[in-house]
Image (cartoon, rainbow, N blue to C red):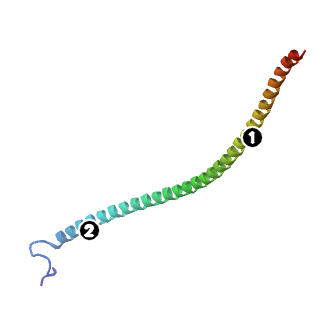
C-alpha cells in the first residue's frame, strides 16, 4: 500500500509539495500585507483630503461672510460719498452766490464814489 495521496507525482516526495505550497502561501501573504498597507495609506490620504476639503469649505464660508460685509460697507460709503458731494455742491453754490452778490456790491460801491465825485 502507498500512503501518498493520488495527486502527488510519484517522483517528488510530499515534503517538496508542502515546501512549494508554503512558498506560495508566504508570497500570497506578502502580497496581502502589501495590499493592506497600500489601502491604509490610501485611507490616510483620503482622511487628509477630507480634512483639507472641510478646511477649504470653512475658509470659503468665512470669505463669503467677509465679502458680504465688505459689500455692505462699500454701499454705505457710496451713499455717504453721494451725500457729501451733494452737500459740497450746495455749499459751493451758496459760496458762489455770496461771492457773486459781494462782487456785484463791490462793483456798485466802486462806481458810486466816482458818480458822487461827478455830481459835485
Q: Looking at the picture, how far across and down is residue 94, in whole percent?
A: 77, 37
- Compared to residue 44, the image places residue 12 above or below, namely below
- Considering every residue shown, the one lying at the far bottom of the view is 1
Q: Looking at the picture, how far across and down is residue 78, in whole percent?
A: 65, 47
Which sits in the foreground, 23 or 3?
A: 23
Q: Is residue 12 left or right of residue 33?
A: left
Which sits in the foreground, 86 or 13?
A: 86
- Compared to residue 107, the image places residue 62 above or below, namely below
| Among the 4 quarters of the image, the one containing residue 24 | bottom left
Label 1 vs 2, first from the N-terminus: 2
- Compared to residue 46, the image places residue 115 above or below, namely above
Q: Which residue is mark 2?
A: 25
| Among the 4 quarters of the image, the one containing residue 108 | top right
Q: Quadrant of the C terminus?
A: top right
Give the label on residue 90, or none. 1
Q: Is residue 86 left or right of residue 35?
A: right
Q: Measure how far apart labels 1 and 2 are at the Cα level.
A: 96 Å
Q: Is residue 106 left or right of residue 84?
A: right
- Considering every residue shown, the one lying at the far right of the view is 120
**Is label 1 or label 2 in front?**
1
Q: Looking at the picture, how far across and down is residue 87, in whole percent?
A: 74, 42
Q: Quadrant of the N terminus?
A: bottom left
Amino acid at each position: 500500500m502507498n500512503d501518498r495521496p493520488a495527486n502527488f507525482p510519484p517522483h517528488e516526495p510530499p515534503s517538496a509539495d508542502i515546501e512549494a505550497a508554503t512558498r506560495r502561501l508566504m508570497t500570497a501573504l506578502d502580497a496581502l500585507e502589501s495590499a493592506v498597507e497600500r489601502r491604509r495609506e490610501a485611507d490616510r490620504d483620503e482622511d487628509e483630503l477630507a480634512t483639507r476639503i472641510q478646511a477649504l469649505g470653512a475658509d470659503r464660508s468665512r470669505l463669503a461672510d467677509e465679502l458680504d460685509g465688505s459689500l455692505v460697507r462699500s454701499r454705505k460709503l457710496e451713499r455717504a460719498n453721494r451725500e457729501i458731494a451733494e452737500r459740497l455742491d450746495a455749499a459751493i453754490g451758496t459760496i458762489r452766490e455770496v461771492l457773486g452778490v459781494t462782487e456785484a456790491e463791490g462793483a456798485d460801491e466802486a462806481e458810486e464814489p466816482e458818480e458822487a465825485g461827478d455830481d459835485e
